[in-house]
Amino acid sequence: MSFDNVCKVLAEKYPLDFARWLLNDEPRNIKVLKTELSIEPIRADFVTFLQTENRILHIEFQTEATSKTPIPLRMLDYSVRLIRKYQVPVTQVVIFLQETNSEIVFAEAYINETTNHRYRVIRMWEQDSAVFLENPALLPLAPLTRTNSPQGLLSQVAENVAKIADKETKQDIAAYTEILAGLRFQKNLIRQLLSEEIMQESVIYQDILQKGEKIGEQRGEQRGEQRGEQRGKQIGEQIEAVKFCLRLLNQRFGELDSLIIERVKALSVEQLENLGAALFNISEVADLLTWLNQQDNDK
């Protein structure tokens, strides 16, 4: 699943928290708008539109500074379309996730001979960590913020994730955090501080460890033990990927048919990652079935 997609999921799952952060306001009502815009329809895959009482908040997440259509021009295009459709002011924010020196991340306007269109830019590596550490909805973005001790920051993020009382929320936030932290940290360090600490009380996690140990014992040699540990990790990655995709599917479609669930569980880790990336172009269960059928045909 792409980094931009994870941010989109977060913004649409916790719209009020993102509106409070980006608008410095306390909206009474807020709703997530579809990302399809009429007038030569386009679909904004990594964009979130939030509507408050009298304003549209347009959030765009960017991992890369470059894009097919230059970001400043795209922001002007979205603004005109949104104002034309909803007849309210539009606040636009581009959030760059990964540190870069590209000039694009410092541009905050589209300017030509007749137009000067301005928008807001947030560079995550310049942001104060405290804002994100204090809010579970924003916590997955915390590893990308400003710090003099990146590893210390990741440790603090892991501690705050572990403090989340609701088990399902904790697992979701941990999964989002693990993915976004990959923009800055090595996978082994992320797993050490996040997944293992959070999952160690899980029955599934214990089962993974036991399977790895049994395989290692049967080999009776160090190479066998290493294979056992590797197999255990592979099983763990598979389970985590399945759980994450099923959560996304349930959020999109509600309760799924058991046959569909079994087909998702049978996917490889790579296919599950592809499903996460494709999900934002899948609007109906029928589209999901078509995608699953294509995976069967490609085997």
Image: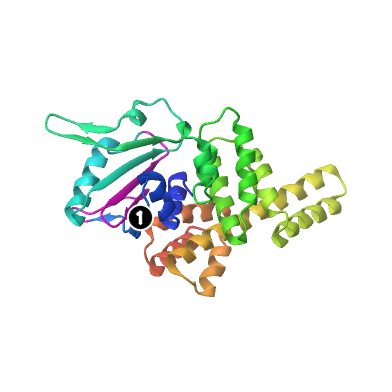
Q: Residue at x 35, y 36 (%)?
A: 121
Query: Is residue 182 visible from the viewing direction of this image?
Result: no
Q: Residue at x 62, y 60 (%)?
A: 167
Magenta-drawn stretch contains 39: yes
Q: Secondary structure at mark 1?
A: loop
Q: Nearer the viewer, residue 277 or 30?
A: 30
Q: Which residue is mark 1?
A: 27
Q: Give, as a three-letter code, the residue at label 1.
A: Pro
Residue 129 pos. (x, y %)? 52, 37
How many discs mark residues in the rendered view?
Answer: 1
State how the image is colored: rainbow
The magenta stretch spans residue 21? no
Residue 166's spot in the image, x, y percent? 60, 60
- Name the residue rendered at 68%, 42% in the picture: 192
Q: Residue at x 76, y 54 (%)?
A: 209
Which image quadrant is residue 157 in? Answer: top right
Q: Position of residue 188 (x, y in %)?
A: 66, 39
Q: Is residue 264 above or below residue 138?
A: below
Q: Is residue 267 above or below residue 196?
A: below
Residue 114 image-quadrant placement = top left
Decide: few, some or many residues near mark 1? Use Cα within 10 Å; few <14, some 14-19, many ≥20: some
Q: Is residue 233 visible?
A: yes
* 274 relative to 76 in the view: left or right: right
Nearest to the observer: residue 112 or residue 27: 27
Which span of residues is magenta-colored? 38-65
